[in-house]
Image (tube, rainbow, N blue to C red):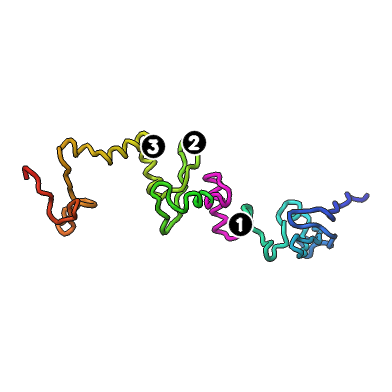
Amino acid sequence: MKGPVPENLVGKVFGKLTVVGFAGYGKGNSNKKDRMWLCKCECGNEKTVRTQSLKQGKTKTCGLGNCHPRGKYGITGKKDRERASNLAILYNLNPGEYEKMLAFQKGVCAISGKPPKNTRLAIDHDHTTGKIRGLLYWHMNKSLSAFNDDPKLLRAAADYLENPPATFALGEEVYGMLGRVSKKKKNRKYGPSGSKERQPRKGQ
């Protein structure tokens, strides 16, 4: 009793490969029963591929020149593919969409207006809804979390900076040390001029 007639793949298209003829069976004990097919790539190169690789989508191009396999995201280079995978998994972004946002922001942080220096701008998203909002310096992104992404709090913070309550409470502008406060005399500089001596005040 004869077994089932093997499927004829001639004329069928798999990715960029078109099957043009049967090429015999595989060599070696592990794949000697594999049916092999001569395929012609869109670029003009020919390649012999086994049935399973074609039907399972493992081989879609000749793998030469411009047809070099580029992985799931159509990108060469392991690091670039890993980054594309992370962007897809974490932020649901397609390849090139990070660059599209960066171009729209003219290459700068959406809040500070400054370009990144030694690292990429961070992707900012709403932690409650997952909505992608834009690209920011990492510390700007972190600061939004400190305000719970609340626009009212951020507007209140802006008003606080423009109208500090201490000035009204004390009846005058009082300047302390510049930068981080330090008890070391050599590090002391007082605002707004940066002098080594404190601002003269009544009662001191």
Q: Which mark is residue 75?
A: 1
Measured Cα–Cα span from mark 1 to mark 3: 36 Å
Where does the image place residue 131, in percent across and percent down from the top left?
A: 50, 39
Classify 169 as above or below 80. Answer: above
User: What residue do we see at 46% from left, 39% from top?
Assistant: 126
The earlier-in-sequence mark between 1 and 2 is 1
Q: Start and end of the magenta stretch? A: 76-99
The earlier-in-sequence mark between 1 and 3 is 1
Neighbour tally class for label 3: few under 14, some 14-19, many 20 plus, Cα within 10 Å: some
Residue type beneath disc 2: Thr
**Could you tell whether 120 is left or right of 15 in the image?**
left
**Could you tell whether 95 is left or right of 190 in the image?**
right
Q: Which mark is residue 148?
A: 3
Q: Which mark is residue 129?
A: 2
**Could you tell whether 58 is left or right of 154 in the image?**
right
Classify 140 as above or below 117. Answer: above
**Which SS type dominates the magenta stretch?**
helix
